[in-house]
Image (spheres, helix red, strand yellow):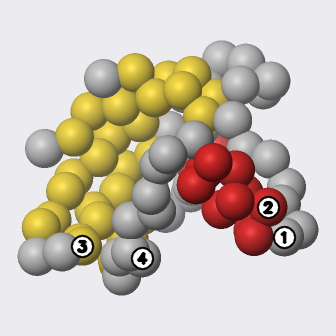
Amino acid sequence: MLEIELKFPVEDFSDVEERISSLGLTLSPPVEESNQLFDWPDGRLGASGRLLRVRSADGRTILTVKSTVPDDSMKVRSEIET
């Protein structure tokens, strides 16, 4: 899978929620999750832009591996989950 991600600072989420509603979409209820990140003691995975994560939410556990991010303007990287 390819992850494409842009992040924007938001001061007031009511404007975002209003815009989503105006498009006829609904917000899902929040989900409580637990994330554990793994790395070598010297931090080389994170330093290279890679990620190894175990996420638990809604009774499911997902192992995720993310590759490096080649461009800072937009996060586009491969993501493998199982």
Residue type at tag 3: Ala
Q: Give whichever of 43, 5 is nearer the camera.
A: 5
Please state, as top left, top right, bottom left or bottom right, where the C terminus lies in the image: top left
Query: Label 4: which residue?
Result: 30
Q: Give the percent coordinates (x, y) of residue 53.
A: 35, 57
The nearer-to-camera label among 4 and 3 is 4
Q: Are marks 2 and 1 in contact (CB under 8 Å)?
A: yes
Q: Give the percent coordinates (x, y) of residue 61.
A: 15, 65
Instruction: Residue at 78% x, 26% y: name it.
Output: 72
Q: Are marks 2 and 3 in contact (CB under 8 Å)?
A: no
- Mark positioned earlier in the residue sequence (4 or 3): 4
Query: Label 3: which residue?
Result: 57
Residue type at tag 4: Pro
The nearer-to-camera label among 2 and 1 is 2
The nearer-to-camera label among 3 and 1 is 1
Please give left or right for residue 22 compared with residue 13 in the image.
Answer: left
Residue 38 seen in render: no
Residue 18 seen in render: yes
Cα distance in 3D space between marks 4 and 3:
11 Å
Q: Which mark is residue 15?
A: 2
